Image (spheres, rainbow, N blue to C red):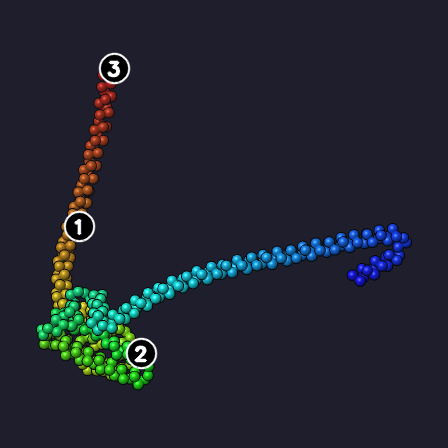
Amino acid sequence: MIFVAVYISNQIKSASGKGETEKMLFDMVKEMKAEMKASVDKGSQTVEEQLRHQRDSMDKQTKMIWERLDNASKVIGGVQKQLGEIGEFSKGMKDLSNVLKSPKLRGGLGEQLLYEILANALPKELYRMQYKFRDGSVCDAAIVTKDVIIPIDAKFSMENFKLMLDAETDEERERVKKEFIRDVKVRIDEIASKYILPEEGTADHAIMYIPSENVFYELIVNTPQIEEYSKKRSVTLASPNTLTYILRSFLLAYRQYELQQHAGEILKALGGIAVEAGRFSGELEVLDGHIGRTVKSMDNVKTKFGKLTGKIESVQALGEVENVPMLADGADADKE
């Protein structure tokens, strides 16, 4: 502004008269107004462009925020649904856990699992459910053949096993483990005394089925004294997986045994087949001879038939030659 005032003052001083001064002032003011207006317009345009750019940017950011919020809402909804399903599953597992707290229900579950394994591994004629002995004792199942009976009984020692897993101190864990081992030994003794009865046709050993792989692993891996005790009492411990292998191995051995038992009959049958094959071979040779002679006879017949056909054709040809002169003589007689 100072520069403008000085500039105007200098212009006024250099003006020759009042009229020129006024005109000069008017033109300068007009020019300044035009420049200021152009500057203001340009500034306004720049501000508007910046505002529009910022507004567009804010609109995009707002849209992205809403999209993310919408996606987050969907994710939260899915998570809530899954949490609900997990809650239902947890409730179901809790109910199952409560059910398994009952030894009777737990035993029933173990028996049902045993029945399914037997049904999948053996033919129906090789096992029985709820096998009953003469004294009234009943084991859960038995492998039954005409020569031997192998008792199988399901035992589910879970109470002390669970307490052992939940123990907070080593001392408590060792104490509960001793009780767990004692429980298992009682089950082994029960099976050995009640179900190994050679006088009733049983084998000299039985199978103790443990429906839980975790319990079986604990017994076999972490408590070797149990495995030694079970061998001493002639009781084989089996989990769902190992019982399946045992049954399949038994079935294979049984079929091989049956094959050996019937080997004489099979050889006798094969001998009979060999005799019949020999007879058939002889009859086939006779038939082959008959067929050979028949073919030879057919060849002779064909040869004779060919000769006969040749003679017939010769006679026919001779007759045709003799008929030609006779026809000529008849024609001459007509002319006379």
In the rendered image, the vertical position of residue 171 relative to residue 56, given as above or below:
below
Q: Residues within 10 Å of mark 3 (few under 14, many from 20)?
A: few
The residue indicated by pointer 2 is 166
Residue projecting furthest to the bottom: 171
Of the image marks 3 and 2, the number of the one nearer the N terminus: 2
**Looking at this rendering, what residue extends furthest in the front direction?**
18
Number of the label disc, if any, that sits on residue 265? none
- Between marks 1 and 3, how big is the CA–CA gap? 67 Å
Q: Amino acid at mark 2?
A: Asp
* Residue 54 screen position, x and y as percent: 60, 59
Mark 1 residue type: Gly
Q: Which mark is residue 292?
A: 1
Q: Residue at left 83%, top 58%? A: 8
Sequence order check: which comes first, mark 1 or mark 2?
Answer: 2
State which quarter of the image contains the C terminus.
top left
Q: Is residue 238 visible?
A: no
Q: Mark on residue 335?
A: 3
Nearest the viewer among 185 and 12 is 12
**Residue at x 43%, y 62% (from the top left corner):** 75
Kindly state the secondary structure of the residue where label 1 is placed.
helix
Separation of residues labelled 1 and 2 (CA atoms): 93 Å
Q: Residue furthest top?
A: 336
